[in-house]
Image (tube, helix red, strand yellow):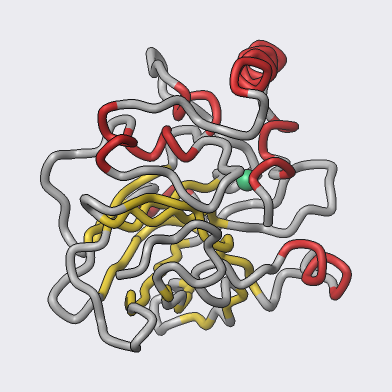
Amino acid sequence: MMKTTTTHDRTLPCSALLVCILLLSACGGRTAPVTSQTEREPIVGLPCEGCDAVFEGMPETLGWQTRIAAAGEGQAMRIEGVVRDGTGSVVPGVIVYAYHTDANGLYPRDEGARGTSAYRHGRLRGWAQTGPQGEYRFDTIRPGGYPGTEEPEHVHLHVIEPGRCTYYIDDVLFEDDPRLTEGKRAQLVRGRGGNGVTSPVRDREGTWIVARDILLGEKIPGYPPR
Ligand SMILES: [Fe+2]
């Protein structure tokens, strides 16, 4: 899915939408501002709207698992997977960034939040850094679909390879989502970072378990060889 066509902006308040329009105008919708961190981790796989926002608010210390939404905020969901390189080897130390809508399909932001991420990504966002076996996990809630649209439920994912590059990969999508029609699959799924279409199952506690493995650099234009 091209970030130029992500639809979450449609659900933002008018004021936020105006800011987004101004931002798009400023960068032509093709490139992202260069910051000290994007110099260290250049954005590849352009166009990539919002890729610079992955650094906003990122904690200095990260674990392989993190919580995004409080357990009581919606249907509990766990996204977990393993990050591998092109040879199939697991890769520790890779940062996976996720953000998604709340149970109502909106991107709410924290009071007083500033920066691109506050407008574009909302408050339900988090980072995990892969462990020794390339593993990562997000504990959160299942996102709602955008109200009044036919867009499938989804979780946005980005990868930050420290000291190398950053890029977005295919959203997490859900096989059991009635909005995920064949037409939508053909339109949205591109295989960036591997397959984003998942098969959710519920564990004994009712938590949705979603497996999303990541293949570094897969179908990412301009990806530097490892
Ligand atoms: Fe979205």
Q: Residue at x 42, y 19 (%)?
A: 115
Front residue of this view, candidates 96 and 225: 225
163 displayed left or right of 178: left
Q: Is residue 199 left or right of residue 135?
A: right
Q: Which residue is rendered at x = 62% and y = 67% of the image?
A: 173
Image quadrant containing the N terminus? bottom right
- Residue 42 image offset from top left, x and y in percent: 37, 43
Q: Count of labels shown?
A: 0
Residue lying at 52% horizontally and 48% vertically, measured from the top left: 100
Q: Quadrant of the C terminus?
A: bottom left
Instruction: Indicate whether 111 appears above or below 220.
Output: above
Residue 46: x percent and y percent?
57, 46
Give the quarter of the image for residue 179.
Answer: bottom right
Q: Is residue 209 visible?
A: no
Residue drawn at x 57%, y 71% is: 196
Asked whether residue 82 is in view, the answer is yes
Q: Position of residue 170 (x, y in %)?
A: 57, 63
Relative to 23, is 44 above or below? below
Q: Position of residue 130 (x, y in %)?
A: 22, 67
Quadrant of picture, ligand 1: top right
Q: Is residue 178 left or right of residue 69?
A: right
Position of residue 108 relative to residue 145, above or below, is above
225 and 188: which is toward the camera: 225
Q: Residue furthest bottom?
A: 88
